[in-house]
């Protein structure tokens, strides 16, 4: 243990982490930059903060304050000690509705403050798009704004008082009239009054540099306000008194369509006299599905408020009438507004990919100009992009003249980095020429601080340095930011990654087959760090269960980044740090859809486990549950299911089996069906079957086949009632001599006769445990079996959502060299999709009952649930299903050591929903894992939608 670490452990009550994982998780924020810290401290209180500063001052080790780690300019990274306020100093100390103030700690997430203020009709004005995970301390450090700044200003406008520890350890209470100012600050200001009165541009979003003009006598000598936006370079905030504003009782959202972004930008300033709450802008190339928006190539999102819905709508209508638009819509329904705002909020992640899939990066993320100059600035900005051969898609706070943009810089090669520097220098001059600020929201950090002389001149920058020296004479706090900055092209996080593609098993088609590019997808916007799953969202259940960064999608991506870099995590695929972080990944695939940049941690986990255990002994659970299809097929062939069930019911035998198999002792072993689905089918085949409808092949997945054949039986009944002909895939391999199409002539492969019957399998259990060689072999055998099916036009109906997702996504990505994989993936339909596409005129039975339950996480992430919703509605099944993840997630919840997290995930949404269900409600759970979790934790029998509809057929017949 180092001397520094030992002294910190002795001095503070909070956690001190000098281990590889703690450091790796904080090497980056949401910027282009990376710094490796010496250690991380999670302080308990202000005394801990002061103690850390004292120890670090003695050792001359810098200190960086970190909130949610979503800063985009590099200011939340450092080489010394990182202070993590999210673990302990994350409380709402008090809230006073009468004075409309709240006292908050720096690690408090903004949404938690909003939730506490809402019952009083109040809210905190600034609301960045990262509101579900950014912290108040980080907002103060960056002087954050958000979409409502045209109405309620920046964070500095909302701060009353700040408790701060200075670089020398002074406890200061900052306020107006020089309250809390460190000794010598007033003298610096009084000697530069003329410069401070003339040296700052007048615009609503001027965030760059220090706000020393707030210290002018005519501005109230507001020390707290001047501290906002100082990026942790002047002192460490330990508590803040913030102002709340009255929230409108009702809101309306007018979405205005324009021909292009230039027209939208020109129009934005003209809407400000109407008193909107927001004027946000974005163009079509950032909208995944523009059909939900009015006609246009770019849009303004203009929100209005009022005492009633009618008043809010009337204000929105007035704005629409005043705007020269090509299309418009007004939404007053809160759910509809949230859906539209999600499009805008996800732009910070969506913008990291160009329409052709190539990468784009921050660096010039948030310049701001006077709103009246925005159209002209955008034209010059576009011209500069073209001159440098670059592309970017501007969006952002058009009403405040603030533009966000990610640009397709080449930050991987020396010439590309040099071009990045040249563009940055030239764009800074363009911004200044329009009277703008290099930063309009996210701060200067390392990205822009080097260019501040272009905006302020050298004399003003020297004044900034003098102010920094008063607050922090030892340059202890976040050195290299704002004053005496590091070069904007140093410490780039990409420079440490391997230049040659890493040898991997999956194809990573969206990343050009490059695993490094896949890992680079995570840009740190941290949507995975939300503390509650909103609506149908899933990501990231393990983080919500533990609250630990290493169990978030971002945290795991950071560890994989460091594994590839090899500087901090030095043992590559053998890394125990990466393995342990991935251990609590449920492989729910929620990040694949909920992450704005579609990080697919389930696939990365399978890839890692494949390499990590290559040539090594695997955990027992990989053999017991990873090879589940083999064991269950063996039981079926030997007809020993009753014996297995009997032994599993005897406690000593069950205990021994669970211990040998690496299964959680708290779990019950599911009972095997008395008769497999295939055996039921073989007996049933002898009965005459209708021949008039379309042919579909029903996939006998492992769970339906051996554990819940009633689901398959119900599906057959419903599909046939809908007029479809049902067949099962072949169980012997066939050789196709030629051609294709229905009725193709096939010949039996003689080798298959020696093997006997085989079964198709999606390979899910092998993939989830990282047994990718075995998964490939199983999937190739499956493709061989499916040859005659692929020669027809018949679709393949898969009842188990996780198996359908595996066939649709894992199969073509794992067997990317086999064209049959894509052909089969494209044939896969869910139960509801099959009925909607193949039997559109069929009317399901009217069940007329309320439903509760949970949309399967793989269904949400890969397959979508639109057809399921429409089928439920047609059957009179009323109600919404929960989001999140059930927590069992295939083998995850059964593995030893995962039980508590598994239960915590279930307790988040699905279990409370089921417990609160009214009498007669149907508990829907299409996934076998979901049904098992409900049975074992709540004693409730969940049912597949096919079972409910089949029962309805019986009742109606």
Image: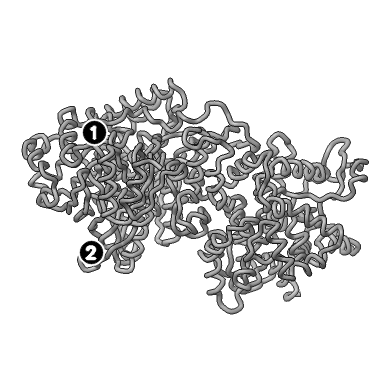
Q: Nearer the viewer, mark 1 or mark 2?
A: 1
Q: What residue sits 65% from the left and 37% below the top?
A: 505
Q: Residues within 10 Å of mark 1 (few under 14, many from 20)?
A: many
Judging by the rendered image, the residue that carries numbered circle 2 is 100
SS at mark 2 in the image: loop
Q: Which mark is residue 483?
A: 1
* Quarter of the image that includes the N terminus: top left
Q: Which mark is residue 356?
A: none
Q: In the figure, is residue 13 to the left or right of 687?
A: left
User: Is 81 located above or below residue 541 in the figure?
Assistant: above
Q: Position of residue 899 (x, y in %)?
A: 58, 61
**Which of the two residues, 274 or 532, is positioned nearer the viewer here?**
532
Q: In the figure, is residue 520 to the left or right of 164?
A: right
Extreme-top residue of the structure: 415
SS at mark 1 in the image: loop
Q: Residues within 10 Å of mark 2 (few under 14, many from 20)?
A: some
Q: Are marks 1 and 2 in contact (CB under 8 Å)?
A: no
* Quarter of the image that includes the C terminus: bottom right
Q: What residue sits 83% from the left and 59% below the top?
A: 636
């Amino acid at each position: 243990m180092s001397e520094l670490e030992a002294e910190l452990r002795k001095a503070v009550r909070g956690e001190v982490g000098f281990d590889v994982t703690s450091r790796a998780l904080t090497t980056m924020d949401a910027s282009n930059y990376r710094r490796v810290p010496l250690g991380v401290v999670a302080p308990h209180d202000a005394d801990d903060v002061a103690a850390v500063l004292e120890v670090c001052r003695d050792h001359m080790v810098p200190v960086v304050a970190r909130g949610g780690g979503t800063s985009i300019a590099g200011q939340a990274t450092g080489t010394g000690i990182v202070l993590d306020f999210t673990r302990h100093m994350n409380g709402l100390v008090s809230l006073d509705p009468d004075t409309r103030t709240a006292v908050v700690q720096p690690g408090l997430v903004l949404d938690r403050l909003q939730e506490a203020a809402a019952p009083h009709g109040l809210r905190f004005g600034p609301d960045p798009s990262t509101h579900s995970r950014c912290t108040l301390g980080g907002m103060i450090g960056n002087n954050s704004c958000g979409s409502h700044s045209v109405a309620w200003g920046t964070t500095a406008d909302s701060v009353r008082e700040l408790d701060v520890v200075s670089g020398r350890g002074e406890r200061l209470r900052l306020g107006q009239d020089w309250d809390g100012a460190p000794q010598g600050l007033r003298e610096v200001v009084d000697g530069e009054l003329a410069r401070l009165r003339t040296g700052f541009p007048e615009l609503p979003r001027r965030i760059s540099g220090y706000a020393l003009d707030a210290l002018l006598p005519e501005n109230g000598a507001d020390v707290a306000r001047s501290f906002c936006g100082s990026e942790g370079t002047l002192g460490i905030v330990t508590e803040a008194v913030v102002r709340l504003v009255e929230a409108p009782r009702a809101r309306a959202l007018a979405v205005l369509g324009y021909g292009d972004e230039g027209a939208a930008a020109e129009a934005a300033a003209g809407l400000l006299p109407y008193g909107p709450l927001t004027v946000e802008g974005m163009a079509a190339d950032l909208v995944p599905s523009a059909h939900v928006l009015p006609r246009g190539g770019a849009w303004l999102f203009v929100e209005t408020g009022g005492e009633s819905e009618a008043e809010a709508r009337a204000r929105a209508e007035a704005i629409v009438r005043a705007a020269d638009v090509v299309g418009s819509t007004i939404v007053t329904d809160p759910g509809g507004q949230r859906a539209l705002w999600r499009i805008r909020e996800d732009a910070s992640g969506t913008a990291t990919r160009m329409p052709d899939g190539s990468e784009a990066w921050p660096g010039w993320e948030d310049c701001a100009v006077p709103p009246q100059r925005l159209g002209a600035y955008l034209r010059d900005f576009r011209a500069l992009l073209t001159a440098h051969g670059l592309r970017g898609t501007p969006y952002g706070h058009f009403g405040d003249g603030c533009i966000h943009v990610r640009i397709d810089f080449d930050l991987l090669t020396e010439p590309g980095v040099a071009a990045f520097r040249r563009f940055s220098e030239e764009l800074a001059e363009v911004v200044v020429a329009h009277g703008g600020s290099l930063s309009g929201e996210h701060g200067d950090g390392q990205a822009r601080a080097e260019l501040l002389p272009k905006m302020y001149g050298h004399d003003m920058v020297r004044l900034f340095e003098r102010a920094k020296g008063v607050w922090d004479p030892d340059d202890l706090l976040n050195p290299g930011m704002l004053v005496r900055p590091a070069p904007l092209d140093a410490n780039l996080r990409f420079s440490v990654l391997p230049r040659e593609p890493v040898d991997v098993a999956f194809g990573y088609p969206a990343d050009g087959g490059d695993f490094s590019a896949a890992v680079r997808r995570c840009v740190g916007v941290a949507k995975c760090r939300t503390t509650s799953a909103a609506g149908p969202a899933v990501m990231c259940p393990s983080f919500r269960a533990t609250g630990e960064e290493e169990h978030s999608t971002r945290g795991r991506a950071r560890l994989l980044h460091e594994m590839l870099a090899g500087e901090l995590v030095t043992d590559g695929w053998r890394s125990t740090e990466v393995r342990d972080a991935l251990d609590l990944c449920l492989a729910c695939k929620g990040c694949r859809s909920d992450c704005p940049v579609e990080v697919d941690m389930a696939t990365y986990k399978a890839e890692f486990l494949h390499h990590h255990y290559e040539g090594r002994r695997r955990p027992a659970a990989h053999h017991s549950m990873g090879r589940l299809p083999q064991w269950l097929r063996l039981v079926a062939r030997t007809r020993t299911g009753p014996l297995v069930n009997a032994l599993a019911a005897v406690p000593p035998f069950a205990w021994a089996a669970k211990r040998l198999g690496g299964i959680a002792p708290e779990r019950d072993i599911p009972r095997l069906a008395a008769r497999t689905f295939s055996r039921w089918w073989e007996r049933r085949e002898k009965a005459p079957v209708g021949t008039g409808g379309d042919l579909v092949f029903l996939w006998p997945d492992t769970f339906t086949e051996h554990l819940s054949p009633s689901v398959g039986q119900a599906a057959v009944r419903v599909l046939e009632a809908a007029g479809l002909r049902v067949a099962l895939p072949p169980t012997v391999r066939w050789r196709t001599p030629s051609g294709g199409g229905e009725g193709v002539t096939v010949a039996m492969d003689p080798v298959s006769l020696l093997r006997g019957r085989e079964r198709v399998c999606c390979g899910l259990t092998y993939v989830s445990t990282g047994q990718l060689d075995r998964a490939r072999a199983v999937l190739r055998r499956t493709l061989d079996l499916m040859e005659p099916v692929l020669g027809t036009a018949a679709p393949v109906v898969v009842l188990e959502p996780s198996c359908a997702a595996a066939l649709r996504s894992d199969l073509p990505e794992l067997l990317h060299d086999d064209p049959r994989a894509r052909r089969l993936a494209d044939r896969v339909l869910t139960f509801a999709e099959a009925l909607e596409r193949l039997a559109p005129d069929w009317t399901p039975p009217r069940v007329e009952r309320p439903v509760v339950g949970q949309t399967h996480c793989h269904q949400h992430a890969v397959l979508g649930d639109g057809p399921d919703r429409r089928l439920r509605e047609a059957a009179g099944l009323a109600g919404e299903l929960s989001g999140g993840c059930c927590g069992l997630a295939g083998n995850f919840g059964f593995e030893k050591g995962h039980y508590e997290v598994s239960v915590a995930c279930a307790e988040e949404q699905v279990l409370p929903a089921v417990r609160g269900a009214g009498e007669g409600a149907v508990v829907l759970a299409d996934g076998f894992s979901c049904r098992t979790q409900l049975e074992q934790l709540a004693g409730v029998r969940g049912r597949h939608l096919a079972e409910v509809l089949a029962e309805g057929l019986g009742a109606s017949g």
